[in-house]
Image (cartoon, coloured by chain):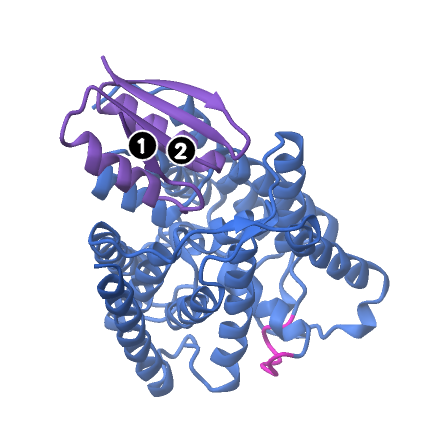
Chain colours: A blue, B purple
Amino acid sequence: MKRLGKEQYTIMVSGSIFSVLAVLLVMLGNPLNMGFCIACFYRDIAGSLGLHSAAVVQYARPEIIGLFLGATAMALFRKEHKSRGGSSPLTRFVISFFVMIGALVFLGCPFRMLLRIGGGDLNAVVALLGFAAGVIAGSLLLNKGFSLGRSYTQGKVEGSLPSIIALALLVVLLFLPALLKFSTSGPGSMHAPILISLAAGAVVGLLAQRTRFCMAGGIRDLFLFRDSTLLLGSVAVIVVALILNIATGTFKLGFAGQPVAHTNWLWNFLGMGLVGYGSTLLGGCPLRQTILAAEGNTDSAMSVLGMIAGTAFAHNFGLASSGAGATLGGKVAVVLGFALLTLIALVVIRKQK
Amino acid sequence: MQIIDARGLSCPQPVIETKKVLDKKPDAVTVQVDNISAKENVSRYAKAAKYEVFAEGTEYGWQLELRKV
């Protein structure tokens, strides 16, 4: 093992801060093990905008708005904000769509998976195995030459729009909340105060932009390049969440009765497997896509739109799991997702040869 | 000297392309990148593969010269 350098320490400290904020958000009102969940939060936003009508998951999560604003601020400060795009935007939309289907069959994005492990939820450990398997499968395709093509410089307006849209949502949330839908029961009704959620999101946005934090990237880099830098960030999230959950009495080891979770191990494994697979083909997990969109990457902005559409479909067509388990539709959609992503990858690889 | 054009490629592809070339142990190679994560990731990989990295800012981003230590 190499000695740890500054980069490794920075990402471990960042991951630790993410967990502290996540546990804090739960103490202030977020659902258990859901201080952060990019998939759940996009689903709540889709619900709040009326894109789906699942009454229990509707809230314009300020954490997401904070992620955008924090990452944009850091990118501008470091002169890394660049409008770019044109690398298979529609393909990215479709892949991201299925990444969200997988996430909602499991009930969480990679970020929440780490937080669930830290809360003692063993279903998330099963999901982690699936996630790792998905990332490794995606990495093998990347090694075989899978590529979504080059991106190109775009006009300033194009790359600024993601953050401007996030800002617009904040204005509506603060001053015109009557335009939005808000859950009165269920996970969507559970949340920390708006400004605290916003600030926590902004801090994570700043740090994730700075460190290029990515859960899929961690496993991918270890597998492809024997580089553990990114993975150390994810490890820090789990370890610190574990310590804080034990300290605050929210730690509960086991499979059954975990908050916003189900115990169908096969579908936890496959759901998160699809997330890992798709995220690796996209070049990053849902959090990383969000941060890149905030930096002016419009391909990742298309991924964000694909994720929002995916969450809306997941609820409109009964694909998302509940505490009772995965649905038949969700299982079919996950299998279809694997087939479609593999087909896309094989066609792309063949074209290049 | 061999030039790898990794402009516009998203991570990890710039590193994969670099790795393919460095696996053949050339004395030096140039990598063109246009985004900061590609620059950081290629540099980190090159250093781990025992190459020195000289980065030069260009109009599109950076030109990285990797030389065997």
Q: Indicate which disc residue B32 carries.
A: 2
Residue type highlighted by circle 1: Ile
Q: Which residues are magenta?
A: A51-58
Vertical side of A231 occupied by B57: above or below? above
Return the residue found at the far top.
B69
| Image quarter of the N terminus of chain A | top left
Q: The numbered mark 1 sits on a residue in which chain? A: B
**Image point (58%, 43%), residue name:** A205
Q: Quadrant of residue B27?
A: top left
Residue at (44% x, 64% y) in the render: A92
- Identified at 36% across, 19% down, the residue is A5
Secondary-structure class at tag 1: strand
In the displayed structure, does residue A332 sit left or right of residue A97? left
Whether discs 1 and 2 lie on one chain: the answer is yes
**Disc 1 residue crowd, few under 14, some 14–19, many 20+, Cα 10 Å:** some
> Which class describes the residues within 10 Å of circle 2: few (<14), some (14-19), or many (20+)?
many
Q: Are marks 1 and 2 in contact (CB under 8 Å)?
A: yes
Is A120 contained in the magenta span? no
In the rendered image, residue A346, in percent from the top left (x then y), is placed at 23, 67
Question: Could you say which is closer to the camera, residue B24 or residue A103?
Answer: B24
- Closer to the camera: disc 1 or disc 2? 1
Residue A159 visible in the snapshot: yes
Quadrant where the image shows the C terminus of chain A: bottom left
Residue A162 in picture, x, y percent from top left: 65, 55
Q: Give residue B3's mark.
A: 1
Residue A87 position (above or below residue A97): above
Between residue A277 and residue A94, name the one nearer to us.
A94
Q: Chain of mark 2?
A: B
Q: Is residue A175 left or right of residue A304?
A: right
Q: Residue A148: image x %, image y %?
A: 38, 58
